[in-house]
Amino acid sequence: MTSLNIHEILNYLPHRYPFLLVDRVLSCEPGKNIVAVKNVSINEPFFAGHFPHFPVMPGVLIIEALAQAAAILSFKTTNSRPDDKSVYYFAGIDNARFKKPVFAGDQLVLHVEIVRTMKGIWKYSGQARVSEETVAEAEMLCALRAI
């Protein structure tokens, strides 16, 4: 099991503020699963425009946070890092469900496991939780492609 701080995460994701959505990796078992954290702050740029009278984290960004955790898991699994010659793309999202809103002050805990890999396509199952309660879940397909 491996944990990563933000400085180490920056080595595995090309994303930067304001689109970096993983703050810490609590555990990562390459080839199997990852548990990561996104601390949701009222200072997030999306809160100014996403229901200012009732600010909630957009569901698409919760799914993106899961995908970023999945990317870290894939890079750790293949013992590689992103480079300027490739991009890690979403290839599909299935069975996405949003069960509860996520508010400023929440800690989003991202649970992602590898379902299978085939011909460069990775399938994951992901759950986002706040206080042990599932707030969103999805199956994701991602692919690493040369550019």
Image (cartoon, rainbow, N blue to C red):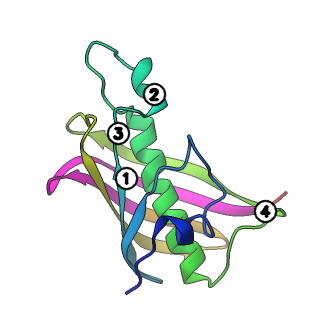
Residue 116 higher or lower than 92, as above or below: below
Disc marking residue 46: 2
Q: Earlier in the sequence, mark 2 or mark 1?
A: 1
Q: Earlier in the sequence, mark 1 or mark 4?
A: 1
Q: Position of residue 97 (x, y in %)?
A: 30, 41
Q: CA distance from mark 4 to mark 2?
A: 28 Å
Quadrant location of residue 126? bottom left
Q: Nearer the viewer, mark 1 or mark 3?
A: 3
Q: Which residue is mark 1?
A: 38
Residue 133 counted in the magenta span: yes
Tags 3 and 4 touching, CB below 8 Å: no
Q: Earlier in the sequence, mark 4 or mark 2?
A: 2
**Label 1 Cα crowd, 10 Å radius (few <14 / some 14-19 / many 20+):** many
Q: CA distance from mark 2 to mark 1?
A: 14 Å
Q: CA distance from mark 1 to mark 4?
A: 25 Å
Q: Residue furthest top?
A: 53
Q: Nearer the viewer, mark 1 or mark 4?
A: 1
- Judge by depth and name the residue closer to the eye, 5 or 58: 5
Q: Earlier in the sequence, mark 3 or mark 4?
A: 3
Residue type, label 4? Ser
Residue type, label 3? Ser
Q: CA distance from mark 3 to mark 4?
A: 31 Å
Q: Position of residue 5 (x, y in %)?
A: 45, 70
Disc marking residue 143: none
Task: Residue at 36%, 43% (x, y): give it.
Answer: 96
Residue span colored magenta: 125-145
Task: Residue at 56%, 40% (x, y): give it.
Answer: 18
Q: Nearer the viewer, mark 3 or mark 2?
A: 3
Q: Which residue is mark 3?
A: 41
